[in-house]
Amino acid sequence: MKLTGRTIFEGKAEGLALVSPSPMSFYGGVNPDTGEIVEIGNELRGQSVKDRILVFPHGKGSTVGSYVMYRLAKNGVAPRAIINAKCETIVAVGAIISEIPCVDMIDINRIRPGAKVSVDGATVQF
Amino acid sequence: MFLTREEEGMLAGQEGRATQKAMQILVALGKIYDAEKLVKVSSVQVSGVSYKNLGDAGLEFLNELAEDGKARVKSTLNPAGMSLTDWKAQGIQSGFAEKQLQVIDAYRRLGLEISCTCTPYLAGNEPSFGQHIAWGESSAVAYANSVIGARTNREGGPSALAASLTGKTPLYGLHLKENRVPTHIVDVDASLGSSEDFAAMGYFTGKVVKDGIPYFRGVKKANLEELKALSAALASSGGIAMFHIAGLTPESDQMVGKTESVTFTLTDLRETGALLNDEGTPDFVSIGCPHCSLTELATVARLLKGKKVKREFWVCCSREVKRQSDEAGYSKAIEASGAKFATDTCMVVAPVEELGYRVVATNSAKACHYLRNAGLRVKFMPMEECVAEATRTH
């Protein structure tokens, strides 16, 4: 299937989908050194975002979250791309400064967890 | 979104990598929030200064930008995690201090004023009515929009910095008149006699109104210090970036749109105060969140005259207001008591929990909110009681 959304940060990536049904907070929610999701109550707790195509509705929490994304990238444990239903400031800024391809306005319910997904600019294929 | 030829050039990297990165941030935000274009800003206040919040990643990002980025408009800085000169006396570890000074150095190379205050409007960054600005620091955002009538969204660290490096911000949200109208009416049925009362009202309202725009009715007068405390409290229990007070704030004659109604009573005032009081005896007392004005320092000096403090007591203010206080003779009286000035920093952004303190007494509802999140216990009390607490023998 091929879906077209809106480019937040241009780029190409391919990987397996890690799908969070809940909004994500990177600050306090993801370990910046390992990429492990640590947020209490998040369905994906214990899994790592490293090298995945990370899919979630939208970001939440502190604006420091943008810097956590940057740290993930510097530590080599960032997701390969981010797909949002509706991107907000924290994730958009984080994706840009970390140079993680990011696309939003995608119906994320259609993406099956674990599916092989490719992102190219505004296009998502799986 | 429409971009001018100059802005297109910045986005294409013609003015260097930092400017390009900054423009990418602004364009992405403009897209997300359906901005029609970018607008010039007259000043910027950058948050994200304390190494406690930035960490090594933030520091690295700033260093990267500082390679070829430069502020294009007046840009001031939020408080750091320590006094830039007296950090040893504050008990700060040298490892932390070294990193914090590197952060400051990166900002200096970026051309920002090392003002290190959350009250830029008391330290030379004074926008005027109707001006577009891009400010971080939630309490200053609420103050600038509401009390001054300047226009800013609640910027995060990188987006404020992006505005500084380009001189622009996307035109959306509170930059547009139609988004500055009230969402809630708050009828104030209590007489407010101090900054702490205004802080309690703000803390109560933030919880109810969340990220809306409250319109207070029934407040007869308010001074700068009270409005500062109200701004900070509204923005900490809620995400409020703007408020109106009927007859007092410059845009309070705005048409009231579709609004919900709330009442703030004397009971709410008392209950909010009680809510911010934990068990325990304070081992740390601090005032100046947001940073003290000169008037507040005059009061502290008067209250401390002839007394000795018995526990750690921080008086937080900007270097600029401290200088004014030195000239007025207040600083001498304050320091003679053993109280410490905490310039460039405050009890919220300094690593107070790592300094070994457990229970903090303060007159700031905002500080209570954030210190609790950091695992400390808090006591919310008026400034007079803070001074009494600091000077009392337990």
Image: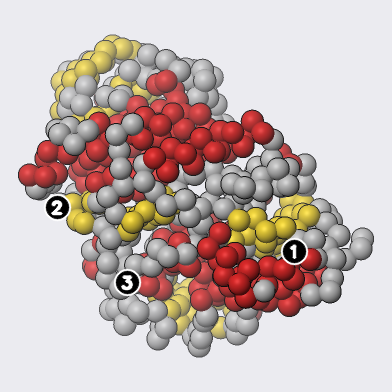
Q: Amino acid at mark 1?
A: Glu
| In the displayed structure image, the side of residue B73 where residue B281 appears, left or right | right
Furthest toward the right, the residue is: B394
Q: Amino acid at mark 2?
A: Glu
Residue at the spot of label 3: B128
Q: CA distance from mark 1 to mark 2?
A: 53 Å
Which of discs 1 and 3 lies nearer the camera? The answer is 1
Residue B117, x across and y down, in percent = 51, 57
Count residues near mark 1 (Cα–Cα under 10 Å), then give few for <14, some for 14-19, many for 20+.
Answer: some
Q: Which mark is residue B64?
A: none
- Confirm whether residue A85 shows in the render: no
Q: Secondary structure at mark 1?
A: helix
Which of discs 1 and 2 lies nearer the camera? The answer is 1
| Residue at mark 3 shares a chain with residue at mark 2 | yes
Say which of B262 and A65 sits in front: A65
Residue at the spot of label 2: B36
Q: Residue at x 37, y 53 (%)?
A: B75
